[in-house]
Amino acid sequence: MSPSVASTQPQSASLQQLQLETEALKKYLAAQKVIIASLERRVGRSLDTLDVHLQSLISTSEESALWYEHLHSMQNEVNSLCDLMSDTMLLQKLEAGKVEVKLEPLTLEPLLVAVSRHWRNPKDGSANRLIYEIASDLPPALADQELVEAVLTDLLARSLKYSDAVSPVVLGAERLGDRINLRITAQRFAPAGSRDFATEIILCCRRIEVQRGEVTCQQHPDGLQTVTIALCIASH
């Protein structure tokens, strides 16, 4: 091999690596732009809503039931903003690698039952809408329990809140090759007609991706959606 050919090969490899890093950076910046635009819209709407309720409080008697309704609405809007800011800060920490990830063998069936027990037995007397489809022979997953719990709790809460009151939600788990798939199938995971949840979607994905896992979403012909969380199987 001539010296010129030998010197060209490392240069080519370096160029390919640079191209890969450039593409990764472009995707990261594109995701950040989506998040920022989503935050601007949602914070703007929240501030407008707060201003409307504030003006109503000023013009309404404190002895009126309507006054307390506006106050309650303002508190809910503030709580939503705080949750949004908290999610955004956590997402930035995940992106910067500043969240400690504890990967360890995790038995999934007890975890799935525990995080869903609240909805399996509703305390408000409403009908149980949660259906289990959990395989009985699941091997342990290599995962961070706290991060997995957070994602499952958030997805279950959203699916049950935003789907119609008579629409069931399916929580399933099965082994597929060297992965364990956790899946939630529901009518929807966000308010009907709303697509402005970039922060929550990307946070959900990042919480799983830092565990070497993957999140995918499938739209079914009947209108239902399935969010699948793929986790690595713990080695023996």
Image: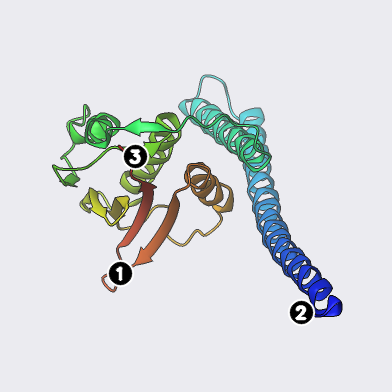
N-term mark: 2 or 3: 2
Q: Nearer the viewer, mark 2 or mark 3?
A: 2
Asked if 81 appears above or below 129 in the picture, the reply is above
Q: Element at badge 3?
A: loop
Mark 2 Cα-neighbour bin, 10 Å: few <14, some 14–19, many ≥20: few
Mark 1 Cα-neighbour bin, 10 Å: few <14, some 14–19, many ≥20: few
N-term mark: 1 or 3: 1
- Visible in this render: residue 128? yes
**In this picture, residue 23 sits left or right of residue 100:** right
| Residue linked to disc 1 | 220
Say which mark, if any, is on residue 234: 3
Instruction: Report how far apart the C-alphas of labels 2 and 3 lie in the structure.
Output: 45 Å
- Visible in this render: residue 191? no
**Image x and y of residue 121, in percent:** 18, 31
Q: Nearer the viewer, mark 1 or mark 3?
A: 3
Q: Residue furthest front?
A: 1
Looking at the rendered image, the quarter that the N terminus falls into is bottom right
- Residue closer to the observer: 229 or 69: 229
Q: Amino acid at mark 3?
A: Ala
**Image x and y of residue 61, in percent:** 58, 24
**Image x and y of residue 68, in percent:** 50, 25
**In this picture, residue 215 sits left or right of residue 140:** right
Q: Amino acid at mark 1?
A: His
**In this picture, residue 17 sits left or right of residue 181:** right
Residue at (42%, 59%) from the top-left corner? 216
| Residue linked to disc 2 | 1
Residue at (63%, 39%) from the top-left corner? 88
